[in-house]
Image: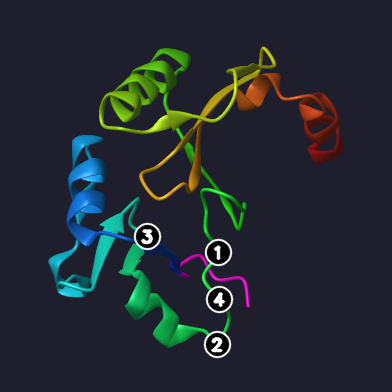
């Protein structure tokens, strides 16, 4: 099944399409109008990954299970990469200014730095920067490749 052209669509229930769209546009994301309407919007993360925000009622059309209240239950952790530590902090400050709440203190492992916020519906988004060359075990991988 692994295929370099496989696309990922993460689907999340939201209480307000308009508020969600304003929030994520405020963070600089773009939306694909082809997959967006009054019940759902498609936010582009990259060429191969998107997030579908579906109005709660519309989301429930796709599952017989109850929708988790993300303000009380963690159903998923979403992590997006950033180009630098400073970019992580800038993104976080922008999210907070748009109504997000910080989940926990920043995590700093030297080779990796990240921060987390709850979006307007309580979904946890992690924003992280990593220096892969400094990742523990990287030397072992390089030795194996030789």
The residue to which callout 4 is attached is 66
Residue 143, relative to residue 61: is it above or below?
above
Mark in front: 3 vs 1: 1
As measured in the structure, the alpha-carbon distance from the residue carrying label 4 to the one carrying label 2 is: 7 Å
Which residue is depicted at the point 23% across and 60% down?
A: 17
For the residue carrying disc 2, how many other residues have a C-alpha within 10 Å: few (<14), some (14-19), or many (20+)? Answer: few
Which residue is depicted at the point 52% across and 58% down?
A: 69
Q: Is residue 3 magenta?
A: yes
The residue to which callout 2 is attached is 64
User: Does the residue at mark 1 contact the one at mark 4 (Cβ under 8 Å)?
Assistant: yes
The residue to which callout 3 is attached is 51
> Where does the image place residue 62, in percent across and percent down from the top left?
45, 85
Q: Regarding mark 3 in the picture, which secondary structure is present there? A: strand
State which quarter of the image contains the N terminus: bottom right
Q: Earlier in the sequence, mark 3 or mark 1?
A: 3
Q: Earlier in the sequence, mark 3 or mark 2?
A: 3
As measured in the structure, the alpha-carbon distance from the residue carrying label 3 to the one carrying label 4 is: 20 Å
- The segment highlighted magenta reads 1-6
């Amino acid at each position: 099944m692994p295929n370099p052209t496989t696309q990922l669509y993460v689907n999340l229930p939201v209480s307000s399409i308009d508020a969600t769209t304003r929030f994520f546009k405020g963070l600089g994301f773009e939306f694909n109008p082809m997959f967006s309407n009054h019940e759902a919007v498609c936010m582009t993360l990259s060429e191969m990954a998107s997030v579908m925000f579906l109005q709660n009622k519309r989301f429930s059309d796709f599952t017989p299970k109850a929708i988790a209240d993300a303000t009380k239950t963690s159903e998923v952790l979403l992590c997006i990469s950033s180009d630098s530590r400073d970019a992580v902090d800038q993104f976080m400050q922008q999210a907070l200014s748009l109504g997000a709440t910080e989940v926990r203190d920043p995590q700093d492992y030297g080779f990796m730095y990240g921060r987390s916020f709850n979006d307007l519906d309580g979904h946890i988004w992690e924003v992280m920067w990593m220096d892969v060359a400094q990742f523990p075990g990287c030397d072992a991988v390089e030795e194996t490749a030789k």
